Amino acid sequence: MVSLINEAFKKARSANRPALLTYTVAGDNTKKKSLDILKSISDYADICELGFPHNTPIADGGQIQTSAYRAIKNGIKINDVFAIAKKFKLSKKTAPIILMGYYNMIYQYNENKFIKKCKNSKIDGLIVVDLPYPENKSFSKKCKRKGINFIQLVSPTTSNARLKKIIKDSHDMIYYISMLSTTGGKLKVSPKKILQNYFKIKNQNKLKNVVIGFGITEKTIKSLRKADGLVIGSALIKEISKSIKKRQNAVTNVTNLVRRLKIKIK
Amino acid sequence: MKLKKGVPLIDQHDQFGFWGGKFGGSFIPETLKKPVEDLTEKFKKLRKDKKFIKKRDYYFKNYIGSPTSFVKLENLSSQLGGAQIWAKVVSEANGGAHKIYNATVHALLCKAMGKKYIVGDTGAGYAGKMLSMAAKKFGLKCKIFMGAKDIKRQKPNCDAMRKNGAEIVPVYSGSQTLVDAVSECMRYWVSNCDNTHMCVGSTVGPNIFVKICGWSTAQISRELKAQLKSEFKKIPKKIKLINCVGGGSSAYGFWSEFIDFNKKQIELIGVEAGGPKKSKLHAAPLSRNAKIGVLHGAASYVCQDNEGQINETESISAGLDYPGVSPIHCFLKDTKRARYTYATDEDALNAYVMVTKFENLNPSLEPSHAFAEAIKIAPKLSRDTIIIVNSCGDAKKDRDILKERLGKN
């Protein structure tokens, strides 16, 4: 089976640029609006990550917390998240989508049922923030069996021995957390240092697509363009929050931002 | 699921950190794996290190003031009839509550790991106050995360923290109580784990924090065991150990030496926060049949909705106002070694009034929940039954709430 995630990286590589990955929260600030945003930004983004919001997000900074609370307050349920993803895939058949969230939501839904539902909704990958290696071994295997990419995270604190094992157990994509921070923190490490760490991971297995996330903004994205992919989340959500506050069209504003980001990495 | 004898409960977990195969674990972001592993290794070594134990015991004795007294509540007992009611007055410990044990051990660990900064969460403010005291004592810079709602209702403890030189970081997200304070503290640690040590204020959180806290508060039951022997010549035949349960650190500390006993001889009773009488909200995941979920890095019974969103809780007692509970208490519940029940806000207030009327004791709202259960069951029990309540906190911090609800103080 063709991995749409792999294809997206191939496409970006052939254009001599990193893949652009976006993160937005399902249901922020309404179900329809979040679907519209997704559809619209995917004209420029190579891979879309869709967050299923949790009200106790221990690894997220202020922007994503706010977005998640807004979505939950407006009544988003996990089945709505699947419905949004499914609708998105109906209109954008080859655009890869990754669900991202916290383990308790999956645990309550039931692991097997959750994976099955992902499959039915044509979801390409999963990121579970608080299910690290090796605790995620059995879940990640289950995902693989259903053709869903389980995306392993690595961070600056990951030891070399651990890194080797994680890479060995990873699927098509690995997510490198740029620095010690929650999402949306100010980039406190130099891009040079981040890329140095990045290549330490990349050079272990060149076949894996390694993306960098956390703290990336319009200002910093260009300096990291040597990576296979770059994830931008909090900056987009900041734009959504701003649009809501100013009563402007969030879909247009966020899309414009994603377009500008894409130009910066070309 | 079975309890092992002769092994401390904190060590009865599997290789992934689960008690009974399903409670606990370490559901943490990748960034925290390394600092958690480092801490695990360090603790494993130090708890076997004679010099470290000596240091701990020195500070427990000379700084905390161990042992705290064990007294019979004569007036309350004769007023109620039935069982004898005793109290282990842990609130005599330096700072006024059991939280000082965990805080002191964490400060010692922080020093041993060569870190200069220490952060912690707090609900009632005792965990924060004690951590700020220990930080000051050992020359560490300290930050305390506390829900904005709790800062308002537990002002005396906040004043103490500031006086000790700690910075209080108010948390405005979610319900603005302990649950949000713990989340924010963990976020801070994710961002600063290279130079900062985190102290989790109770027997909750990733596996290692449950262990460290339980290892620290276990001092309470070591003292009690000796005190029982000297008071009664041997451990009496019918004992009931009653303790309030929020996260569960004082209850574990109060019970740990007695878990191996037959429950017919020593019954363990945990009292959770039932919340206001007419409210649907509570903080009683064990006694009101919550489902298992993952909160703050561990699996336990958690007040949550069907989707896994964590419920808001409500209790007059900030220290018990938490939607999760220690995995070791879940284990004790499922193995039926301990029995869990709850007391409402009103029950706790009534108990507070009664205890303070008859005894020279001033239990905070947390142990007042335990006293409520003692008062309820004592009249039905025989004279030779010994009820012991862990009076684990002092009511000084509750001054404003008590004034508002009871119109005095």
Image: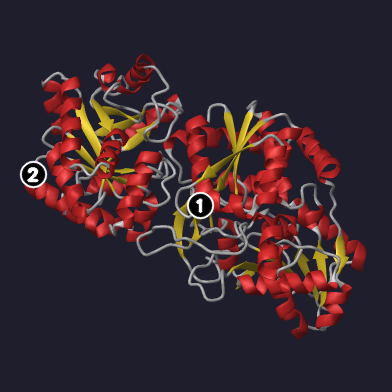
Furthest residue toward top: A192
Tell me if residue B14 can be seen: no
Find residue A93 and name its label.
2
Quadrant including the N terminus of chain B: bottom right
Q: Nearer the viewer, mark 2 or mark 1?
A: 1
> In which chain is the residue bearing label 1?
B
**Corner quadrant of residue A75:** bottom left
Counting other residues with Cα less than 10 Å from the Cα at mark 2, is it few (<14), some (14-19), or many (20 or more)?
few
Q: Nearer the viewer, residue A70 or B117?
A: A70
Q: Nearer the viewer, residue B71 or B34?
A: B71
Look at label 2 and name its amino acid: Lys
What residue would you read off at disc 1? B176
**Element carrying mark 2:** loop
Q: Is residue A167 above or below residue B6?
A: above
Say left or right for B250 vs B315.
right
Real-space CA distance between mark 2 and mark 1, rounded to the nearest whole angstrom: 43 Å
Q: Is residue B292 above or below residue A22?
A: below
Q: Position of residue A13 (x, y in %)?
A: 15, 22
> In which chain is the residue bearing label 2?
A
Q: Nearer the viewer, residue B265 or B121?
A: B121
For the point 66% across and 50% down, the residue is B155
Counting other residues with Cα less than 10 Å from the Cα at mark 1, is it few (<14), some (14-19), or many (20 or more)?
some
Q: Position of residue A58 (x, y in %)?
A: 44, 44
